[in-house]
Image (cartoon, coloured by chain):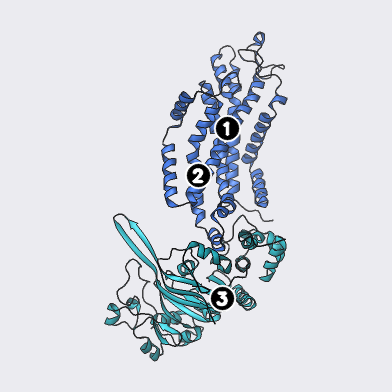
């Protein structure tokens, strides 16, 4: 329906060097994550004690860790871990936030008041403390990590969508739909939804690096992804514990974190500039 | 002519509560007005007189506190009653661009009523082209987005959408606001053509007296949420019965500056709805106000066949030939 508008957004995203850079990085990480088994030179779990702590070489481009596992392969599979957790969590949180936000913004006033109270009480919890509490109760693991991120992020997304829905709800084109006799479901799905998802996509894209960092942070603390599954966080931890034997490990494990964060942040900012018509300078055709 | 729309003592209240204070504002009070089939009624008044609210209330978009709306003889009470007449009514918006969904093409927008009411539409593109042609827009406009249209084109698209289901009643809120004079004329001619072709009834909401004089069979003048005068347009213009109407007409720009009447200029601002004036609500700004006007509120009464005014001295005012 709005393919014309989307093509315009893509074009102005590519015209912005930062946005294009972000998009390329994100696509590279996505390919890395999806094609990990084919592009990783070794099995990331294969232990080879005789080859431990090797510096970068032609055989092992990024060297090996304390168990002789190939670091490059572990980082490539780590992208898979990081992105699948971040995108699953962001997707679920974004979807639930979208639904609740639209209900709060367009629904009856008492429901709005109730939902806003819920959002406020949820977001008053400090994220790390909450994460530690949930991990203590449920036990560490990928599922727990996603659960924590989802619970913590929902209120922010829901509030954003609620504000968007509220401001559009009184717009003339929505009133026009009501006058024509459109049902609330139709107005929400066909008219409000396409107009409120834009900002959500931007925020989600900027939040994915935050989730990736959280995953890495918790995995570093051994509270996230369980070894031996490769995660950038536990690679970083391994690097830290063997800092003297292989000083390059910490740097190599940190690099993808930095690049992924930059990529998603630039993409988010580029998208924001491309979608926000007030910032757009229209080039005459 | 049979009545299509009858408003009987319609009131709209809005309550503003800031604990522990509670104020009720009568946005509209005691509106009694009928609109016959094939008739055009012009609803005029200053900004804030309640014209737009009235238009929305009679479509069920505003909670009605008292009184009834009858459409084609059927009283409309519940939301379901209003929903039932949706295909037979349409609203044209003051801001035509804003009334079109920004992510829908014009073609999708004008055929939207068919989709909403599940009317058969074998080929929506053909139908869109047909509707656009009817309002004088080229068929290739169908693939444009609202922000790509000019004000006049958006207005035409709005007309096309309003008339898609061939309604009986069209409420036009400032149909010419923000348009060039030449485009205004085109839109008015278009509205008149469509009226003749489909037997529409219009309620035209505006503060533009020239527009009302041009299109309306009857005129209803609003002041502070009440009707102060109703009657056939020509008669009201030639011999107004309410001083407010007279002042509005006198305030219209005249081609000859010597014919301007400065003595009838309305003094001051429209009073606040929170603190309505006592007696006749126009007394503070009326050139004829007497002690009686300050205490006793006049009723909207018949002053001649088909004419009503809410003034104690309507007859005197008319005789003066103001």
Residue A95 to residue B84: above or below: above
Q: From the top left corner, tell me how far across and down residue A76 is, in percent.
A: 65, 25
Q: From the top left corner, tell me how far across and down residue A218 is, in percent.
A: 51, 25
Q: From the top left corner, tell me how far across and down residue A1 is, in percent.
A: 66, 52
Residue closer to the observer: A29 or B135: B135
* Letter of the chain shown blue in the rendering: A
Which residue is denoted by mark 1 in the rendering?
A: A86
Assess whether mark 1 and mark 3 are in contact (beta carbons under 8 angstroms): no
Q: Are marks 2 and 1 on the same chain?
A: yes
Which residue is denoted by mark 3 in the rendering?
A: B201
Q: From the top left corner, tell me how far across and down residue B121 is, in percent.
A: 69, 62
- Please state the chain letter of the residue tagged with numbered disc 2 in the rendered image: A
Q: Residues within 10 Å of mark 3 (few under 14, many from 20)?
A: many
- Please state the chain letter of the residue tagged with numbered disc 3 in the rendered image: B
* Residue that protrudes farthest toward the bottom in the picture: B319
* Residue that protrudes farthest toward the front in the picture: B74
Give residue A256's quadrant in the image: top right
Structural distance between the alpha carbons of marks 2 and 1:
21 Å
Residue B197 appears anywhere in the view: yes
Residue closer to the observer: B83 or A150: B83
Structural distance between the alpha carbons of marks 3 and 2:
42 Å
Q: Colour of chain B?
A: cyan
Which residue is denoted by mark 2 in the rendering?
A: A100
Q: Quick check: A40 left or right of A235?
A: right
């Amino acid at each position: 329906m709005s393919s014309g508008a989307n093509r315009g957004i893509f074009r102005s995203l590519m015209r912005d060097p930062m946005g294009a850079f972000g998009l390329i990085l994100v696509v590279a990480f996505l390919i890395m994550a999806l094609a990990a088994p084919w592009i990783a030179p070794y099995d990331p779990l294969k232990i080879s004690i005789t080859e431990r702590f090797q510096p970068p070489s032609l055989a092992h481009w990024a060297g090996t860790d304390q168990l002789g596992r190939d670091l490059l392969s572990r980082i490539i599979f780590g992208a898979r871990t990081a992105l699948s957790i971040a995108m699953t969590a962001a997707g679920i949180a974004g979807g639930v936030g979208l639904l609740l936000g639209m209900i709060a913004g367009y629904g009856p006033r008492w429901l709005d008041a109730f939902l806003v109270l819920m959002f406020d009480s949820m977001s008053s919890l400090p994220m790390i403390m909450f994460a530690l509490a949930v991990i203590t109760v449920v036990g560490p693991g990928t599922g727990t990590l996603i659960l924590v991120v989802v619970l913590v992020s929902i209120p922010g997304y829901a509030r954003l969508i609620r504000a968007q829905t509220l401001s559009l709800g009184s717009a003339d084109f929505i009133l026009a739909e009501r006058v024509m006799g459109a049902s609330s479901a139709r107005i929400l799905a066909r008219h409000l939804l396409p107009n409120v998802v834009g900002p959500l996509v931007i925020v989600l894209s900027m939040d994915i690096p935050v989730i990736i960092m959280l995953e890495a942070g918790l995995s570093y603390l051994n509270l996230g992804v369980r070894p031996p599954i490769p995660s950038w966080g536990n690679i970083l931890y391994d690097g830290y514990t063997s800092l003297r034997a292989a000083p390059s490990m910490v740097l190599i494990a940190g690099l993808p974190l930095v690049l992924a964060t930059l990529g998603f942040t630039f993409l988010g900012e580029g998208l924001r500039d491309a979608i926000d018509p007030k910032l757009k300078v229209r080039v005459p055709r | 002519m049979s009545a299509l729309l009858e408003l009987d003592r319609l009131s709209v209240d809005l309550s503003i509560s800031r604990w522990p204070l509670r104020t009720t504002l009568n946005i509209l009070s005691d509106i009694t007005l009928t609109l016959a089939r094939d008739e055009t009624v012009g609803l005029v008044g200053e900004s804030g007189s309640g014209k737009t609210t009235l238009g929305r209330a009679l479509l069920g978009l505003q909670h009605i506190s008292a009184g009834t709306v009858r459409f084609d003889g059927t009283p409309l009470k519940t939301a379901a009653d209003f929903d039932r007449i949706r295909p037979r009514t349409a609203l044209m918006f003051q801001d035509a661009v804003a009334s079109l969904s920004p992510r829908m093409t014009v073609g999708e927008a004008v055929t939207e009523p068919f989709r909403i009411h599940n009317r058969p539409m074998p080929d929506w593109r053909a139908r869109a082209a047909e509707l656009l042609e009817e309002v004088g827009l080229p068929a290739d406009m169908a693939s444009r987005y609202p922000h790509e249209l000019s004000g006049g084109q958006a207005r035409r698209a709005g007309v096309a959408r309003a008339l898609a289901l061939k309604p009986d009643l069209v409420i036009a809120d400032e149909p010419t606001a923000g348009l060039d004079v030449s485009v205004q004329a085109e839109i008015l001619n278009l509205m008149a053509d469509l009226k003749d072709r489909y037997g529409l009834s219009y309620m035209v909401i505006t503060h533009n007296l020239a527009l009302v004089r041009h299109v309306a069979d009857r005129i209803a003048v609003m002041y502070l949420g009440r009707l102060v005068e109703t009657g056939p347009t020509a008669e009201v213009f030639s011999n107004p019965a309410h001083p407010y109407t007279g002042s509005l007409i006198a305030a219209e720009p005249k081609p000859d500056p010597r014919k301007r009447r400065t003595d009838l200029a309305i003094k001051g601002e429209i009073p606040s709805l929170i603190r309505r004036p006592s007696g006749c609500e126009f007394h503070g700004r009326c050139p004829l106000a007497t002690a009686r006007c300050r205490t006793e509120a006049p009723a909207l009464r018949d002053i001649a066949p088909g004419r009503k005014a809410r003034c104690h001295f309507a007859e005197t005012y008319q005789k003066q030939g103001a």
